Image (tube, helix red, strand yellow):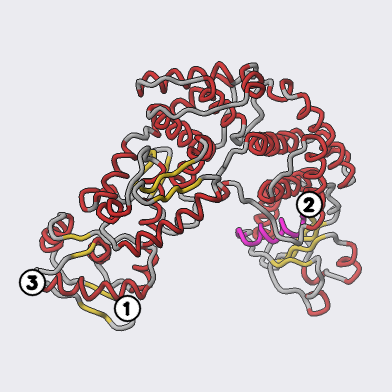
Amino acid sequence: MITFTTRQREILKIILDANRPIGSVELAKLLHITPRQVNYSMKGVKVWLQQHDQDLSVVPGVGFAVKLTADQTRTLSQQINGHSGVQIILSVSQRQQLLALFLLTRREPFILAQLETISQVSRMTILKDINEVDEWLHEQNLRLIRKPHFGILISGAEHDCQQALTKLLWGETPFSSEPITEITHSDGLMFTLEGDAQLLPLVEYINDYFASLHIQRAISLVAKAEEQFGGRFTDDAVLHLALVFSVMSNRVQAGNHLDVDDKLLASLQSAKMWPVASYIAKRLARESNSIWKSGDVAAIVMEMMAAPRNEILPGELEHESDFSALSERLMDHISQAFGISKLKHDRTLQNGLMNNIVPACFRQRFNLWFPVALNNAGLPDRYEKEHVVAEEVSQLVYEFTGVTLPQSEVNNLVVLLRAAFIRNRSYRFDHVIVICPSGMATAQLLVARLHARFPNLSNLEVVSLRDLTPLLVSSADLILTTVPLPRQYANNQKVIQVHPLLMPKDIDTITQFLS
């Protein structure tokens, strides 16, 4: 009987669950592989089905299918879910992530032959993988020691080891094209290969490591910290903090501690977050039976100071007088740059700026990592004014703090500035014409919907298509019509054709015009 690979098994599972023909392109997307890899695996799927008295049918131009009754599907599913005769096939991405995690969590050197055994691939393959991992580790300020008669071992500062582990577990590395992790508020940190742990020693080792990371417990501790602060971190920041605390707890339990400069430590101990960080450390120490040092507690403070918030934490700006002065300076500059005096007093903008700038500055100051994928907003280049002002804001931040904001943070500022401009701009739409030839009832419905969606468009005049004149068109700031206008008015930029029921695409078009 042939060996059934885990990839072939997953392909067959999808085909059975779909209960319809499914193509190689769709299968490839679901499995994060190429259509060619799907087609290559299909020979094994077909042979395995034949050995179980079933057949794989191919519908030209549609896809693959297995014609079974409900009972046959259930029986076959039970057979493929078993591990007997199944061989795990890892992608290059998966294998390199596993190897990186393995090396980062080992305290003793591991010889090449042992790595071959636990990963069950050739020495040449292992060497290629290790070279890729070594290149990435170098970027993390870590060194991969490789010596004859000694083995392979990672060397570097504890801070860098923890940061590298967090990046791997979050799935943000050059070799994370097929992430082996998933993290959610409801389920915590999940290992995507958990079900196949017994098929390969390397996967089993990493599965045991995942079991030692108690993310959901850490999430509850972050929520407790929010209660004590009287503020809230962003949802993404909560997950990131929980992962960081879990990694830290695991490292401390293994006897690894963080070193923090005495001057910085004294400063952090005077921060309002220190008592909360001490509480978190005590809880983690008690639950893992470990001893936390001052440097470890300081690391918790730094991570919380650098975490994005939904709102500035009470008393935060008062403690950091530089940020308080910076906040006022930024609001003055933005108000002058846009020529809108109201912007200076826009507290929504001020809070948004500080919610982004303060954590970003702390991340730079403490050399902390935050997932790029969670901090990557932006607007098209056509919003030139907002982009220019955002760069000016970034320069002011540098002058005040000595911190250069990364481009992702500058992009966030562009979005905040655009939202503030929309909130505070002066409407100059004193005369808006509504043309609806279908009757007064339809016209009133459209006007009512316009009032509900755009309360600033208060002066709406319903005009008959027959009464439309060049003078009337030239006097209007905006013309909304449910029908195409005569040719002489059709290309007027003030004319927008909408549906009588004001559909979502109409709302978007009007919003863009008003902006």
Q: Measuring 49% from the left and 53% from the top, which residue is drawn there?
A: 173
Q: Quadrant of residue 175?
A: bottom left
Q: Which residues are magenta?
A: 503-515
| Between 83 and 499, the one nearer to me in the picture | 83
Q: Are marks 1 and 3 in contact (CB under 8 Å)?
A: no
Q: Residue furthest bottom?
A: 60
Q: Are circles 1 and 2 on residues that touch, CB within 8 Å? A: no
Tell me the distance, in whole angstroms, between the alpha carbons under discs 1 and 2: 48 Å
Pair 1/3: label in front = 3
Q: Secondary structure at mark 2?
A: helix
Please indicate, yes or no, whether residue 102 appears anywhere in the rendered image.
Answer: yes
The residue labelled by disc 2 is: 386
**Mark nearer the N terminus (3 vs 2):** 3
385 vs 257, left or right, is: right
Neighbor class of circle 2 (other Cα within 10 Å; few <14, some 14-19, many 20+) is many
The mark tally for this picture is 3
At a point 33% along the width and 82% down the height, the residue shown is 61
Above or below for 112 versus 319: below
Residue 263 in the image, given as x and y percentages of width and height: 67, 22
Q: Which residue is mark 3?
A: 53
Tag 2: residue type? Glu
**Foreground of the two, 98 or 451:** 98
Position of residue 151 relative to residue 229, above or below, is below
